Image (cartoon, rainbow, N blue to C red):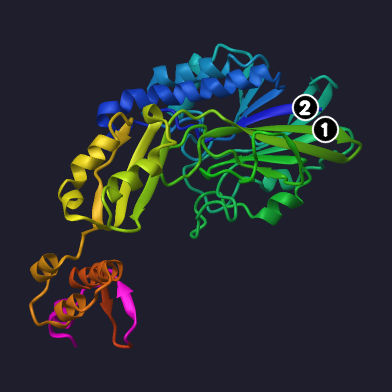
């Protein structure tokens, strides 16, 4: 039996410019801390092998030497052996800068780069002294319309008494979008037909299996992609983790147990805060309720709002948000485009021509909730967020002569 810790898509060297300019050094430091958390966990559980499934570095060029050195030094803290494959961001070539730096910085015998398409046999691994064979499918360019599995398909893989692990980097079917087949695309069935006992893969910044918990359980899955060790943006909705996979072999039959370990220390949250009813403090209360469970010191917020609030809250909306969200690591500009002021008679008259269909219709609604809902809808039409098409269906986001319909009632 062997216990493996798997990570990938670490992207050391990511610059964090733009909106994070003032905090980029903190974010860079946090990524190192996250990897160290995972290495410490691997040591705590006495793992036998540690794998990096590509994109340890963010690029093949312009990754500072000190960044490479620090990443290597953290990995070397694992008490046993670390195996790394190149990804499409840090693809391999003899003269690729990042791997030149890696060779210069790697003075550790336990940190191994798998840079050639050939099996690597490991003996006496784990408490049962297992034989393990690694099959690395490495990237040698940024893009490729064929994956790197071809040489592995030609191998005579010994099943009895040997644990076989495939390592690959590329777009896996259903895990990441690669419609043009430019990123080493691999089909699920293609991977499963190869007679390895497990695939540890990288490239997609999502977790597969998505339902792993921190409690180890027996799995029938063969393909494991841990995603990123720390969340990179709100577009990959993971907390940042590594996978722990235990493989035991009885003859030709492999049994796998797996769990995840949350090692990330920065969380990106993108939410639309919905205001159900315009009441006193509706905005403040809805916002406070949505963010109450997030750690302020480690959370980056991208928030937008949808609904109607009373006049006072609408006027003070930014100040209210600033007050509620004080202390969060980073908060983007608020998305107030779908937040509306209560549809009072004065507000209706300020937005719509007296005597128009919209004005008469809204003034005729006595229920305040229904009037606010109708007001939101008609404002969206007025601002060209939605429009009527020729077949009377509504479409969003198109340009058109919308005001004519709103003001003339046609």
Q: The C terminus is located in which quarter?
A: bottom left
| Side (left or right) of 173 relative to 1 | left
Query: Which residue is found at the position 40% from the left and 21% from the top?
Result: 29
Residue 147 drawn in magenta:
no
Residue 17 percent across, percent down from the top left: 28, 33
- Which residue is denoted by mark 2 in the rendering? 2
| Callout 1 crowding tier (Cα within 10 Å): few <14, some 14–19, many ≥20 | some
Q: Nearer the viewer, residue 185 or 354?
A: 354
Residue 207 occupies which quadrant of the picture? top right
Asked whether residue 2 is in view, the answer is: yes
Q: Which residues are magenta?
A: 392-410
Picture quadrant where residue 159 is located: top right
Question: Where's residue 358, x and y in %?
Answer: 17, 78
Tell me, for residue 392, which label it has, or none.
Answer: none
Residue 202, percent from left and from top: 57, 40
* Circle 2: element type: strand
Q: Is residue 304 above or below residue 340?
A: above
Asked whether, in this view, residue 403 is left or right of residue 200, the answer is left
Mark 1 — residue? 248
In this picture, is 258 found above or below 398?
above
């Amino acid at each position: 039996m062997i216990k493996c810790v798997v990570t990938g898509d670490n992207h050391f060297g990511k610059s964090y410019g733009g909106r994070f300019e003032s905090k980029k050094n903190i974010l860079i430091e946090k990524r190192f801390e996250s990897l160290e958390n995972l290495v410490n966990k691997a040591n705590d559980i006495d793992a036998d092998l540690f794998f990096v499934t590509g994109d340890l570095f963010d690029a093949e060029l312009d990754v500072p030497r000190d960044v490479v050195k620090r990443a290597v030094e953290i990995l070397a803290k694992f008490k046993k052996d670390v195996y790394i494959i190149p990804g499409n961001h840090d693809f391999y070539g003899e003269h690729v800068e990042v791997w030149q730096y890696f060779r210069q910085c790697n003075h550790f015998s336990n940190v191994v780069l798998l840079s050639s398409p050939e099996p690597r046999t490991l003996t006496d691994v784990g408490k049962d002294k297992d034989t393990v064979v690694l099959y690395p499918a490495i990237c040698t360019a940024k893009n490729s319309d064929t994956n790197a599995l071809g040489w592995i398909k030609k191998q005579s893989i010994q099943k009895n008494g040997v644990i076989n692990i495939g390592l690959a980097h590329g777009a896996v079917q259903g895990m990441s979008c690669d419609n043009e087949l430019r990123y080493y695309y691999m089909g699920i069935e293609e991977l499963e037909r190869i007679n390895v006992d497990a695939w540890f893969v990288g490239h997609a910044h999502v977790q597969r299996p998505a339902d792993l918990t921190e409690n180890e359980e027996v799995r029938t899955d063969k393909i494991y992609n841990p995603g990123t060790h720390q969340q990179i943006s709100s577009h990959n909705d993971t907390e940042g983790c590594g996978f722990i996979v235990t493989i035991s072999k009885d003859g030709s039959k492999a049994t796998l147990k797996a769990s995840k370990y949350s090692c990330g220390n920065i969380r990106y949250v993108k939410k639309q805060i919905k205001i159900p009813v315009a009441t006193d403090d509706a905005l403040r209360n809805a916002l406070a309720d949505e963010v109450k469970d997030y750690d302020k010191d480690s959370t980056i917020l991208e928030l937008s709002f949808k609904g109607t609030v009373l006049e006072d809250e609408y006027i003070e909306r930014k100040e209210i948000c600033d007050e509620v969200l004080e202390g969060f690591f980073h908060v983007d500009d608020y998305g107030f485009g779908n937040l509306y002021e209560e549809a009072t008679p004065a507000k209706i008259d300020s937005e719509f021509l007296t005597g128009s269909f919209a004005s008469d219709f809204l003034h005729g609604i006595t229920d305040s909730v229904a009037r606010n809902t109708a007001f939101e809808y008609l404002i969206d039409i007025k601002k060209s967020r939605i429009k009527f098409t020729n077949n009377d269906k509504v479409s969003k986001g198109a340009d058109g002569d919308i005001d004519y319909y709103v003001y003339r009632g046609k």
